[in-house]
Amino acid sequence: MAPSKKKHASSQPCIIPGGFAVLSLQFNSDSAARHSLYVKEHKVRAEKSSHRPLDRTLFVLNIPPYCSEDVVKELFSQFGNVESVELRDHPGSTQESGPKLSKFFRPAGKQGFNVGYVVFKKSSSLTAVKSHPHDVPLVVCTEQRPVRTGVQKWIQQYTQSFIHPDKLQQTVDSFMENYDKHKEEEAERQKKEAEQQKEEEEGWVKVTRGNKGTKARPHSEAANQRTLQKEMRKKKRKELMNFYTWQHRNTQKEHIAELRKKFEEDKQRIALLRAQRKFRPY
Amino acid sequence: MILSDCFHEEEENEAPVKAKRIKPDAGEEEEVVYHPVKLSRNDLYRPPTAEELNQLKEAESLFHCSLLKMQGIIVCVYVQCLTHLLDQLSFQKVSDLSWLSGTVKVPFLLLPKITKGKFHMAPPASIDLIGSYPLGTCTKPHVMVDLAVTIPADVLHPKDVVNQRYPRKRALYLAGLAQYLTSSSDIGTMRYSCLHGNRLRPVLLLTPPDKNSSSFTVRVHACPPPGFFKPSRFHPQRNNIRTEWYTGLQTSHSGKIPPTPHYNSSVLGDLLPRAHLQFLSAISSQCSAFADGVALLKVWLRQRELNQGTGCFNGFLASMLMAYLLTTHRISNTMTAYQLLRNSLNFLEFHSAFQVVFVDPSGHLNMCADMTACTYMQLQHEASVSMQFWDNPTVDGFHSLLMTPKPMIRTSDHVFQLCELVKLQSSCKKLNLLSELMDHSGNYIHTALPFILSLLQQGLDQRIQLLTHSLSPDPEWSVESEAPKYKAQPPLSFGLLFRPELAASVLERGPPADSPKAAEFRQLWGLRSELRRFQDGAITEAVLWDGESMCQKRLVPKQIITHLLQLHADIPESCVRYVGAMVDDVIKSGSEVPSTGEEKSLAVVQSYDDLSRKLWRLEGLPLSITAVQGAHPALRYTQVFPPKPLKMDYSFFDKEKTCRSLVPKEGKPCPAYITPITVICHMEGSGKWPNDRLAIRHIRAAFHIQLGELLRKHHKYTCRPCPTHLDVWKDGLVFRIQVAYHREPQVLRESVNPEGLLVVRDNEEAQALEMATIHKPLLTSTLHGLQQQHPCFGAVCRLAKRWLGAQLFTPLLRFNHVGFLRFLHLLSSFDWKNNPLVVNLNNQLIAADYTEIKNGFMASRESLPVMFIATPKDKKLSMWTRRAPNVQMLQRVMMVAAESLKVLEQQLMDGNQIQDVKVVMRPPLEVYDAVIHLNPKQVPLLSQAVDPPSVTFSRGVMTGSAAQSGGSLPVIDYNPVSLYLAELREAFGDLALFFCDPYGGTVIAVLWKPKAFSPVPFKTSQVSARSVKVTGDEANTVPNVEAILEDFQIMGKGLVKSVEARTEKWSF
């Protein structure tokens, strides 16, 4: 494949249709090939989250796997102070839900190419990035800031995978404490709701099967289906089979139809076999 | 319906041959996919005619499936389609003949040279068609039309039966015919052959010259006029070859003249073919299905390689057997072809009084004179196996009986060959077989064979179920060359079918020392036999063979065979080519004692059993353990290289202080790879378990900590708890214990939708968990049981996995040589597209299930995985293959499997080739687009490679017995190659495929995906590793190949030696 990178003679920024500026990136100063980063100011209509302010956030595409959040932060700090960096495997809004997990329990991130949201301290940094000349590459690994890859990285990973049992125990304990507290609060809330309902109905007390005001059995899809099936079965049981002459006749007819169908099916399979030349012995 | 179908078939067949040949080919190329039948309502529900009802009924009652019947009919139709071809052969009477010129040779080994008698050439008295063709029972692909040419009476003399005079005259007569026929151009090619390998009965083969020549061959037999010789002369006790003449010595008439039964029967066989034909055609006119039945039986025989060569059960015998059954009213005239076949097999299976004597209707000829007892036993064995298949409703009987070839190399457990057949001459001398040699007129191979067979049978005795031998094929030679010598025959192959429980025992215990049988035993075993005292106090003769490990013990029969042949038949060991355990090399790993890992697997299983017992006994856990299950291939005996207990060299590693464990050092080679052996530990269900996925995970982590603590306290094991598992260092092995809670998959599936309704939705996470905690342990225990039933299952599985690994297919599939061959055969020939593969573990499936599986499969073929494997527990989904092989990969696997099978079978059966069975394990690298060469230092499993390297690296392992429990935790599950592969696949998985042999492969092969390089419009979700090309207003992206190739280097720094890009192959 032809080298697709356009070598611009002048030190001009390269803007492609779609509004993305192209920055080139190389691993270290000796490497011959370059990746291209595509950057643009972060602009989303329905973004409410506070940690991606629209005027200061840079949206970066195609970050190679060996660039961690820290590396990206370092790379972009030449354009202005960076507040935070967030790497994700595909673009989209954040959907953080549930309690904050400790690092032991967080699912392992993907090691592929990432997209990044770089939040600068000042919005002027964005224009600095976009006007960066295309043919001056960003360098990932330098003398001052070595980036570990390959065997070094794997050994580091292996070393970091050790967790001291006590620390782990602590994490578990604190999580479970939180969880229990949360559970209790929930129960409390439900109880209160139930009481409120009682009061509203002016003297009439609603009688339910549950003892604590909640339903004993959570209504679920499966339960719904089960009741439906039960009904069907009941209906079927009541039916009489082969009682009338026409019913008998119908059964016979069905039987013959079944046989014919099977015969046809088999014939077709034979045709198929023959077409595939499975009859090799002859 | 059937009838009309048949007629249609026949019309088709009458069309010119050319047109017929084209049709199936065209069918092969177009995509044939099965679609469910759609009959219109009208068709289905129209009133049935009486005839149709009968047919449907019959089809259902006679066969498991009406399919069988229709297949049978089509076979027969194919078989009978030759009538019109005969007209091409017009044979003119021989009128005038000058004597033999030098070009045509006489098809006879003149040994001894001289015999008395006069011969002149004369036109034949008559020419008749005989044999299967006029009976309509011949089968494709080698259609033989037998033509009997009667030698005129004045050429022969009634005394000619003596001293091979008649056979020689017959050979001369054939040569005369051949001489005459060379002059006419439209005869085609001529070759000599001999009938069933009997050199006394040469025949002339004529092949028509035109294009469809392959379709049939005419075989010309020369016969004496009917009734020319008196049949009583050929009684088995009579002598027709004089010893004086044969040996050339004048011996005194002191002893009895030895009878020559084989010679007699070979001459007699020439007298009777016309009578036999009459007899058979009379039978066949009585019974309409006779011809079809015989044809089916012949096909059955051919698939088992029983119908060709010396002493075969040929087509003629098949029809005679059928005729015998008909005349004795074992089968009735009105039966169908299919029933005839069934009854004949039934007869073969049960008729034990039936020796290898089968007398023809005239009462003079034993038609099975050349057959050895072993061949007959094989026939019986095959018949009984076939009957079992037939009666098993879950097997497609037709396919396995009549359409699957069973060559010896795939049916016998071990095969060995006798190479230099000249040596048999000396064994004839040693065995004292002169008169038999005379009877066989010098054919020392056939003379010695029965004796060798009975010797082996005696020696292997209880170890084998069946001893078979290959039937030497009929030699064929051109009319211009001399008849080949006996030693020119291909090597004789013998197949052994073992009794698994006895085959590998190292001790042969004989009779007590004082019993009269002891002498016999000593005579058989020679010097190997010695007196031994046993634990029960008995003192008996015994032979002890060497063999320590399982793989050596498997070769005990080889020792026995070579010993016996050397001792009794003078056949040196160099002549015996033993095929068995040749492929085992690739899974061999032992250092002192060569072993194929059975013992190591056993050690692992024992250690695991110990651990599980200790887990059960633990006290102080808040919930009790309900089950401990292994879920690792090593525990089902299918790990290619079972884990080996290791002792670590602490100075080799860095240390991690807080957790007392070792860490790989940067400058050193990668440490030895230690596989964690997964053990699933099910905890009791209780109300205390939370109902939330995250909370469950935390509780599990707490369990891991606690288990580790207890194991450390009570048993001093070094443990490392993690949120997902607990590693235990025990007996030099690492066990990875995972706590499981049976409701967790359910909890993962449940979610509450906005309306407050509890919805159960299947998702990947739940499936993965279920796979790990429920299905894998189940599979492990099932396969463990299977291993107990079939001891070689483990080895076969490991070989198969090794092959898949070596051919770089491992990301696709999760699975002794015969089994390996069968596996390859299955893989290459199974029609994955149109059939499910049903694995009936423990016979849990019944016939109804089979149809259910098939129907379900047909109905939803499109949505199911390409490789569909159904098991008793998993009838609908084929969970093991859902993710893995896609269409292209499966195609390639099948192709490579077929190729490997071919190579392997050829090598195993052909002694001349260089013995390197590892060829099938070496992958071709030409097809790949880029190859990443790895630094062998950092490949931890290097020693397991197909071709182990000459240099080895220290990997921090000390020799000597495995460390006891305790001490620092070693480096577990650290394999740079697999880490690198995972990273590559995550980063570039959408652009390329990466292949690597997980067992010590030092190359990673890269294949670009076909669509990867077509430019796509710029999209934020699709820019990974791509560069933009702007043309006008559009921005398109293509992969940035230079950067990607450099990334291969960067990401694998320290591991990658070089990246070789095969740019010349790329076409974008």
Image (tube, coloured by chain):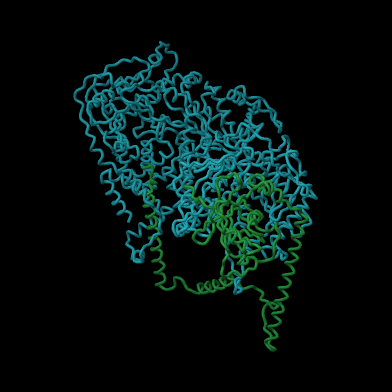
Chain colours: A green, B cyan
Task: Kindly give the residue lying farthest to the front in the view shown.
Answer: A10
x%, y% of residue B676?
A: 67, 47
Q: Is residue B952 rendered to the left or right of residue B195? A: right
* Image-quadrant location for residue A199: bottom right
Residue B351, position as x, y percentages in the image:
46, 39
Res B617 seen here = no
Q: Looking at the image, which residue sits at the far left?
A: B95
Looking at the image, residue B544 lies above or below residue B412:
above
Q: Residue B249 versus residue B911: which sits nearer the camera?
A: B911
* On screen, residue B229 above or below A198: above
Horizontal relation, residue B109 to residue B18: left or right: right
One can see residue B16 in this view: yes
The reply, left or right, for residue B87 in relation to residue B379 is left
A169 over A156 or under it: above or below? below
Work out which quarter of the rendered image holds the N terminus of chain B and state it.
Answer: bottom left
Left or right: A282 in relation to A19: left
Looking at this view, name the residue that lies furthest to the bottom: A202
Where does the image place residue B1011, in percent across and percent down from the top left? 46, 52
For the point 56% across and 32% down, the residue is B461
**Number of disc labels:** 0
Question: Residue B643 location in percent, x, y?
Answer: 66, 42
Relative depth, front residue between B984 and A93: A93
> Foreground: B393 or B622?
B622
